[in-house]
Every structure is written in structure tokens, then in C-alpha cells.
Amino acid sequence: MSERQERPRRARDLLKNFYGLEAAEEQQKQKAEPGSINNHAFDVDSYCQKQLRSQDLPHLLRMNGALAREIKDLDGGMKTLVYENYNKFIAATDTIKQMKKNVENMQGEMERLSSTMHQITASSDAISTALTPNREQIEKLSGVSALLKKRQFLFELPQRLVRCLDMEAYSAAIRYYNGTRTILDKYKHLPSFNSIYSESERIMCGLREKLHARVSQSIPEELSDTEYEAQMRNISDAISLLRELKEPAEALRAHYLSLHA
């Protein structure tokens, strides 16, 4: 192998030796060759004496120049590697310092946050303790308020039913009536509730009669198709409202079917 071809391999070997990469393994693999410049057993004096005896002066001068250039190249490469690694070391040092500073700041923020959370918890406990004696009273008052609203609705029920019937809002009237029927049935023995019960039943009895009259009315034969369909829709709506009033389903169904016979 010529010196020009051997030079890159020498550079790689020297750099590996500089970083200590695979040095021990390479030494174990290599045989002891004192005459080889890349061998771990290289003997400088023996190599020089051999070259002086076997080579002429021009060749020795060329070898000297080649070795000087190679040493210069290796020295430059080594300095470049050292400079690059030094810059990386400085950058890593700065990063570590910044990380340490951020961690210290974060620790301070976490301590302040923990202190704030403790204060909030203490304030919440103090407020809860202060309000505990009044909580049961507030719940009782809330229940009384709801009960008063229900009673107020019951007292106003007859007036609501009359207004719904005047506006022909029969579905709303039935909804109000059905929503209060259980309470009125339960407390109708009390004088204050009995009058509401009696008046509501009277009003809803009138609504039942009006709906039955609508269902039972005869349908003239001279009606157009549109008028006939409108009349049947009115009868169907009346039957649905009577069903909501718990009227017997069989009689209503039989009457509706007789109209379509």
C-alpha cells in the first residue's frame, strides 16, 4: 500500500486513539510489528536505522515532507475537533445553568402556589363553618317557599282554568287540572281546599260536556273534502283531550270508528 493510500487510515487510527475508541481491541488483534508505524509495537529507532540503510537521500526527504504534512493535517484536525467539542461543552454548560435556574424558579412558584392553595382551603373551611348554623334554616325556608308557591298555584287554579277555556287552550287547562288532581283529592276534606276542588271540578265538567258535544255532533254530507277533513281533525282532537281527562277509552274508540264506517 502506498503512503498516499495509507494516510487516511493513519488519520482515522490516530483519531480513534485520541478518543480511546477500540484501542484495546485493536492492540489485541494486531501482531507485534516493530517496523510498522501504525503498530502498537512500533520501534522508532529501529525504523529510522532501517530507512537510512535502505533508502537514498531524495526518498528520505520525500518521506520527511510527507510526514511533516501528515502531522500538520492531523494536528489541524485534532484542534478542530477539540474546538468543536469545547463549543458543545460550553453550550451544554449554559443549558444546564439555565435548566437549574428554571427549576429553582419553578420550585419557588410551586411553593407560592401551595401557600395560596392552603389559604384558599382555610378560607373555604372558615366560610363553611360560619354558614353551617344557617344552612338548615335556609333549607327549611326554601322548602316553605316552594310549598307556598304550590299553594298559591292551587288557590289560583280555578281562575287559570277559566282563562284557558276562554282562550280555548283546552290542553293547557287539562295539564293544570291533572297536575293538581292528586293533591286536591287528598286534601279536599279541608275547607280551604274543598272550595278549590269543587270549583275546579265544576269547570272541568263543563269542558267535558263541551268536548263530548264536539265528538257527538253530526257531519253534514254536503261538506267538501277539505271541510270534512277539518271536521274530523276537530273530533280527533276532542277525543284525545277526553282521553287525557281519563274518559273511558272503549266508548271513545267505538264512536270514532263509527264516524269512519
Image (spheres, grey):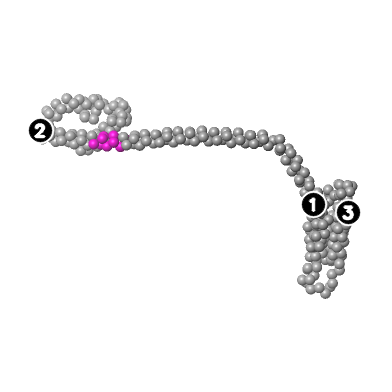
Secondary structure beneath dot 3 equals helix
Nearer to us of marks 3 and 2 is 3
Q: Where is residue 21 in the image (x, y as percent from the top left)?
A: 32, 30
Point 39% across, 36% down: residue: 95
Q: Are marks 3 and 1 in contact (CB under 8 Å)?
A: no
| Amino acid on which the number 1 mark rests in the picture | Phe
Q: Position of residue 129 (x, y in %)?
A: 66, 34
Residue 79 lies in the magenta-colored region: yes
| Local crowd size for mark 2, using a 10 Å CA cut-off: few (<14), some (14–19), many (≥20) | few
Label 1: which residue? 153
Image quadrant in which the N terminus is located:
top left
Task: Decide which of tag 2 and tag 1 comes sooner along the chain.
Answer: 2
| Local crowd size for mark 1, using a 10 Å CA cut-off: few (<14), some (14–19), many (≥20) | some
Name the residue at the bottom extreme: 222
In the shown orientation, is residue 25 left or right of residue 111? left
Looking at the picture, does residue 226 appear above or below residue 251? below
Looking at the picture, does residue 244 appear above or below residue 145? below
Secondary structure beneath dot 1 equals helix
